[in-house]
């Protein structure tokens, strides 16, 4: 049970980190209790391709009828930080 508690705590902290990062960028994010969050970014498919070229894989949601959204799996603190830094640069370009 300790392992499960550690995983849940890490997931909760990662979700908080992503929510705060997206909020800083002025983007809307929807987080629940799963290991991923949804974010409204404008052109999800375009952002997917930009991030993929940087080695970051997200899921664009246009196949679900949500072309302005992406799904991001919660990673480690370091992974989330790298993702948010690259995302900020891509959103400015």
Image: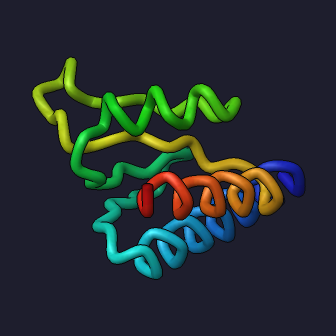
Which residue is depicted at the point 51% across and 78% down? 20
Left or right side of 8 for 65: left
Quarter of the image where one finds residue 30 = bottom left
Up-down relation of residue 2 to residue 66 (above or below): below
Task: Please name whichever residue, 8 or 17, is drawn nearer the observer in this view of the structure.
Answer: 17
- Say whether residue 19 is left or right of residue 73: left
Q: Position of residue 1 (x, y in %)?
A: 83, 51
Residue 10 lies, in percent from the top left, at 75, 61
For this view, does 74 lie left or right of residue 64? Answer: right
Left or right: residue 42 compared with residue 29: left
Exactly how many numbered labels are in the figure? 0
Residue 58, percent from left and from top: 50, 33
Q: Position of residue 22 (x, y in %)?
A: 45, 69
Q: From this viewpoint, which residue is outermost toward the front?
A: 93
Residue situated in front as seen by the camera: 72 or 57: 57
- Of 17 and 55, nearer the camera is 55
Residue drawn at (82%, 58%) of the image: 78
Which residue sits at x=46%, y=26%? 49
């Amino acid at each position: 049970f300790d392992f499960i508690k550690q995983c849940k705590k890490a997931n909760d902290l990662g979700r908080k980190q992503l929510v705060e990062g997206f909020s800083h960028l002025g983007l809307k994010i929807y987080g629940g209790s799963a290991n991923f969050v949804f974010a409204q970014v404008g052109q999800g498919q375009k952002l997917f391709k930009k991030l993929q070229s940087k080695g970051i894989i997200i899921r664009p949601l246009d196949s679900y009828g949500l072309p302005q959204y992406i799904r991001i799996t919660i990673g480690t603190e370091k992974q989330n930080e790298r993702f948010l830094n690259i995302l900020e640069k891509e959103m400015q370009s």
